Amino acid sequence: MRRPIVAANWKLNGSLEMTQTLVSAINSHSANYDSVDVVISPPFPYLIKVAELISTNNVHLGAQSAAEYESGAYTGEVAAVMLAEVGCQYVIVGHSERREYYGESDEVVAAKFLQVQQAGLIPILCVGESLEQREQGVMQETIVRQVNTVVDLAGIAAMQNSVIAYEPIWAIGTGKTASPEQAQEVHALIRAEIAKQSTEIAEQLRILYGGSVKAGNAAELFSQADIDGGLIGGASLDAEQFNAIVSAAS
Ligand code: 13P
């Protein structure tokens, strides 16, 4: 059995005041669902505060990105080793918003993944196709290329301590979620791709779905054979919604 993960991605949202109320609501609810790993990924300035506020064993700290370098003259960047130092356990890499708005190529994403792993953290590697790619029939090759660029650089063994999140770009923040069948198809494709190199690693790899997951659709998505939890954007800013998604994963 793969242990489910429900990960919050706050994106560019939040305030110090919000961290207090949201994290405390997540703490008390998650304590009743210790079969689920809950990850909170706030913006960088709030990481230390959230680390202090987390008081439940199955709630973990995550970051939304990390630099592809360990240190040096890279103004504005944050290194994975620094994230480890302030208590992060997970780091999201290759989110489609980073790929699209900040020009992160598959190669840059792979370099970031490697930095995160080398810092002893668990990367949550995001992959996903645009609506155009889906309509042009290149969805599968897009996903396989995104996964394999990372596996080629980091090695298949690196996937043992990693998480993959399938986030179709057309479902992010649009209210238009992939159907459970559509998501399952891609999750199975990702697992099969990993299984070409190691069935054992493929079997234990946790693959999350992201894209308009809400309290109302989470249970059905999570009931699919290869969906091991969710990466939650908008609904993670609402304690009631997010907690209901945690319950759905248990
Ligand atoms: P939404 O849940 O707002 O669609 O965002 C999904 C996402 O991008 C999580 O990383």
Image: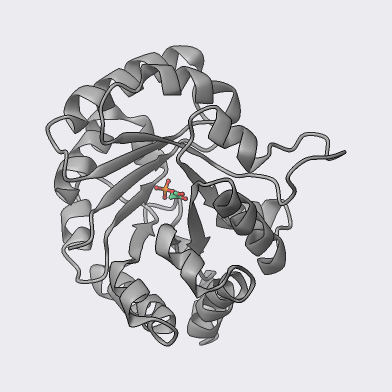
Left or right of 144 on screen, residue 81: right
**Residue 75: image x %, image y %?**
83, 35
Image point (55%, 53%), residue name: 117
Which quadrant of the rendered structure holds the N terminus?
bottom left
Q: Quick check: can you spot residue 16?
A: yes
- Snapshot quadrant of residue 226: bottom left
Left or right of 24 on screen, residue 172: right
Above or below, 140 against 71 in this view is: below
Foreground: 166 or 177? 166
**Residue 209: image x %, image y %?**
35, 60
Foreground: 150 or 20? 150
Foreground: 151 or 139? 151
- Snapshot quadrant of residue 188: bottom left
Above or below, 227 against 52 in this view is: below
**Residue 154: image x %, image y %?**
59, 68
Q: Quick check: can you spot residue 177?
A: no
